[in-house]
Image: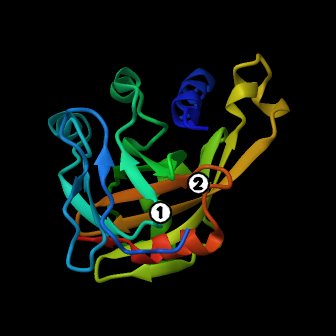
Amino acid sequence: MRQVFSIITAAIVLAGVAGCFSGCGQSVQGTDEKVVVAQSNQENNTVLSFPAYDEETYQEKFGIEPFEISLALPEGWEIKNPEDKEKREQESYGMLLSPVELYADGQYAGVIACNTYEPMEDVPEEDYYKVVYSGIRLGSLYAWEMDPYTPIASGETWETALATVRYKDPEQMNGGKSAAEIPDIEVPGIVSYDDSRHVYIAVQFAENSASSEEIEEIAKSIVFE
């Protein structure tokens, strides 16, 4: 599961397609590079910085200016840098950048990553999410489904919704089968964007890593600082 982003990225290139909540600040582990999280904020939630590492590279290549979000993670969860530095530097993880990994009681539980988007004018408010998430909504091998789109939390310039992440089984993708022969795997996700910075974050959970109630609580806790 933890390799699905890099495996799916490779497949996209080949195919030509583009548990209670304690509210405590979580520790972040990883490499000796700049790592992701500042101290807990006033609400005692985790503050997560993006780009999470290699800040200059992400600014130069992708135009991602540093920003922060806060969120409440379940008790026993922590955030780590991806262990495979080489793959982290070379892979774009689909259309998602600067990923950090979620662990629940030591077990891989998902990933949080980010990207930017180009704002557009004269788009109906109810359809604006299609502009924001155009890079991750429409893939044939890996896609974030969020229709019907229903925001679960919002602020003056930001908005959060639940999503379903659909992708092909990476083990079967590596086994020589065509994509049409391989069934989809679906896992829960969260998307959230800030229209003042033109950035968004996406949280993809591993299978059976969190309950629907936990995921909803995480989603409702996300704030762009």
Q: Residue at x 55, y 45 (%)?
A: 107
Q: Please say if 43 is above or below 211.
A: below
Q: Quadrant of residue 53?
A: top left
Q: Quadrant of the C terminus?
A: bottom left
Q: In the image as oriented, which residue stretches furthest toward the left?
A: 56
Q: In the displayed structure, does residue 172 sit left or right of residue 108? A: right
Residue highlighted by disc 1: 191
Q: CA distance from mark 2 to mark 1?
A: 9 Å
In the image, 184 versus 24, the foreground residue is 24
* Amino acid type of the residue that numbered disc 2 sits on in the rendered structure: Trp
- The numbered dot on residue 144 is 2
Q: Residue at x 39, y 57 (%)?
A: 201
Q: Please say if 206 is above or below 12.
A: below
In the image, 168 versus 171, the foreground residue is 171
Q: Position of residue 32 (x, y in %)?
A: 21, 32
Q: Position of residue 172 (x, y in %)?
A: 76, 26
